[in-house]
Image: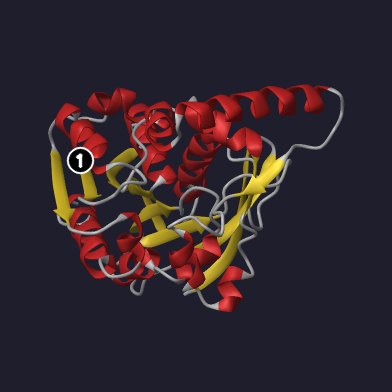
Amino acid sequence: MKRDVEFTSAGLTLRGWLFLPEGEGPHPALVVTDGFGSVKDLLLDHPYHEVFAAAGFVVLVYDHPCCGDSDGLPRYELDPIAQQRAYRDAITFLCLQPEVDPARIGIWGTSYSGGHVLTVAAHDRRVKCVVAQCFTVSGARNQLRRYTPDGLADMRRRWDADRLARACGEEAETMQQVPDTAPSAAYYATLPPELRAKWPNRITLRSLEMYGEYEPAAIVDRISPTPLLMVVALEDVTTFADDCLEAYSRAREPKKLVTFHGDHYSFYTTQFPLASAAARDWFVEHLQESS
């Protein structure tokens, strides 16, 4: 069963769906969000939440602040700190639901939100299990690897100009999230038209500046003793596989690493069955079998 829900984070109303499993509760519960610039509707194309709900979990899926059906301005400003705090407010929302056992809550994230769950799990001991897949390790390092020196210098000039413009009351500059010529455009082109229509493919320019300031794996060693699963695609050059593996080496037990051959978007296509099953089994082991 699915029902529309909303909760408050930093004064904003965030909107999403609550998926309820069959059977009498209270059940273990999971917070699930999609990645950079995405909306909850795109999860319908790679329905991790359905896999989890079928395994007996209550699953909360919602739009990040400023995105999709959630409130917040400027639209599609991707503030990683606001998104982290929303995860924690989502946990609070779950704790208040009669169908949920508040002592058995896990979090799942992918790409940008894969970085969020690392930081949230390191700070919030209400989290009893965490899964991060194809996760952001270091925004600054990613930008150094993905931009030429001249390209990054040009972006910094644009960020400075945008900051001045905002201070003068102008609207935030926006840009395509996925340019038509980007390799990742091929994945988005495969989405059904009704899902693509929900995703504007626009973000604020400042979103990339905040991305470069974001270091979610810096405190990965502090997640322990919360059980941590990392899922990594070995040919991922979006959230680079070697950076993810290095972050795993710094994490402390209990932890598990699952790897497979594929790129960043294989998590949502060819390797969805493997990745979703690995996450499901980790959550079952630590939130159901141990209860």
Q: Who is closer to the viewer here, 132 or 28?
A: 132
Residue at the spot 21% in from the left edge and 30% down from the top edge: 224
Q: Who is closer to the viewer here, 38 or 129?
A: 38
Seen in the image, is 225 located left or right of residue 2?
left
Residue 117 percent location from the top left of the image: 37, 40
In the rendered image, the vertical position of residue 200 relative to residue 132, given as above or below: below
Q: Who is closer to the viewer here, 121 or 266?
A: 266
Q: Give the labeled residue for mark 1.
A: 227
Residue, far right: 169
Residue 108 percent location from the top left of the image: 35, 50
- Mark 1 surroundings within 10 Å by alpha-carbon count, few (fewer than 14), some (14 through 19), many (20 or more): many
In the rendered image, the vertical position of residue 69 relative to residue 64, given as above or below: below
Q: How is the image coloured?
A: secondary structure
Residue 245 percent location from the top left of the image: 19, 38
Residue at the spot 50% in from the left edge and 65% down from the top edge: 42
In the rendered image, the vertical position of residue 58 relative to residue 37, given as above or below: below
Seen in the image, is 252 located left or right of residue 43?
left
Which amino acid type is marked by label 1?
Pro
In the rendered image, the vertical position of residue 288 relative to residue 117, given as above or below: below
Seen in the image, is 168 located left or right of residue 228?
right
Residue 205 percent location from the top left of the image: 64, 37
How many numbered marks are there? 1
Is residue 162 shown to the viewer in this render?
Answer: yes
Q: Quadrant of residue 144?
A: top left
